[in-house]
Amino acid sequence: MEKLFLKSTNDYNLSLAVFACEKPKAVIQIIHGMQEHKERYYTFAEFLMKNGYAVVVSDMRGHGEDAPILGHIADKKGEVLLLEDQKRIYEYIKERFGDVPVCLLGHSMGSIIGRVVLQERSKDYNKVILSGYVAPNPVSGLAVILGNIVKTFTGKQKSSKFLASLALGPYTKAVKDRRTDLDWLSYNEENVDNYIKCPLCGIKFSNGSFSALFHVLKYMGKAKRYKEVNPDLKILLAGGEEDPCTGGEKGRANSKKVLEKAGFKNLSVITYKKMRHEILNEKDNQKVYNDMLEFLEK
C-alpha cells in the first residue's frame, strides 16, 4: 500500500491510499461514508488486490488523520468541492493506470456522492457498487434550507446538535432495545465498539459539512439531473435488510426507481438478511466480499 497526497480544488491535499497490483483487471475508486476514514476499507482493498484489482481509497475532506479541521468539509459550497475531489481522483487514476477500466464504490454518504458524480460522469466508469445506499429523502430540500439558516446564524465551523439530530436521529432510533446509539451501524458488536473507540469515527460534523451533505442528498434524488447517461452501466445496490439508511423496502425501491428513471437499465440489487448499515464489517462480511467480487468479475 502506498500513501500519497493529491492536490485538489482550493489547494486541498487529499489523502490517498493506493493498493496497486501487476496488470490490474480494473481500478476501484472507493468513496467512504460520513464521519469515518479510509483506513476502515484497507481489509477490503487488500482482498480486491489479491484478486487482481487495484484500489484507490481517499479521505473525504474534513475526514481522516490529515484533515486540517476534523469534521469540517468547507465553509461554503462543500458539495461542489466533494464532487471536484472525486473527479480529481479519477484523473489521477487515469494518469497512473492508463486504459485500465475504472469502477466506483461508494458507501453511505459515499453512495450519495457517487450517484451525483454519475449525473455527469457515468461514461467514465465500467461498473458501480453502491453500499449502504441512502434512500432519496423528499424533505431534503427543506434540510438544505435549515442547514443554510443554521450555518449563517451560528457559524460555518460550529456544530449544531439540531442538524446532527436531523441527519442521524432517525437512524439511532431505528434499533429497539439498542445497546448503544450506534447499533444501527451493524449487528457486529465488535465493529460498533471499534467505531466508538476510534477518534476518527463519529466525529462532530460542522454546520458547513451538514450543509454539503444536505445539498448532495437533494441532488441525488433528482433523476433529471443525470446527463449523458450510459444506459448499459452495470450498477449494484447492496445493503442490509435492516439498514435504516436504505429506507426499508420502500426506500430501496425508490433508490432503484430514480436510477431507472435517469436511464440506467442494468441494475442489480442484493439485500442481506440479518445485516444493517456497514455490510462490509458484519461478521458474515466474506459473503459480501465475494458477491461484490463476483459482480466485478462477470
Image (cartoon, helix red, strand yellow):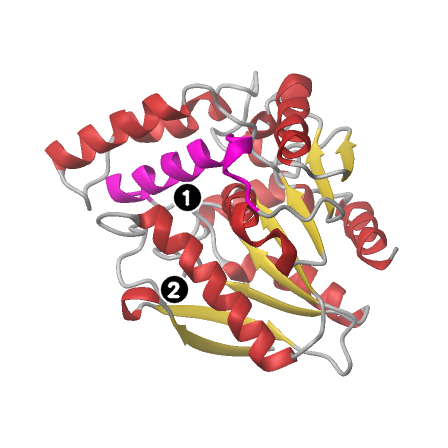
Residue 65 image offset from top left, x and y in percent: 38, 64
Q: Please, what secondary structure does the residue beneath circle 1 have?
A: loop
Relative to 127, say whether 42 is above or below. below
Viewport quadrant of the N terminus: bottom right
| 25 sits left or right of 114 in the view | right
Question: Rounded to the nearest whole Å, what is the CA distance between mark 2 and mark 1?
Answer: 13 Å
Residue drawn 48% across the image and 59% down it: 86
Q: Which residue is mark 1?
A: 202
Q: Which residue is mark 2?
A: 65
| 189 sits left or right of 74 in the view | right
- Type of the residue with mark 1: Gly
Is residue 111 or residue 230 the one in the foreground? 230
Is residue 182 or residue 265 the one in the foreground? 265
Q: Which mark is residue 271?
A: none
Residue drawn 62% across the image and 64% down it: 42
Residue range in magenta is 204-227
- Type of the residue with mark 2: Glu
Quadrant for residue 54, please give it.
bottom right
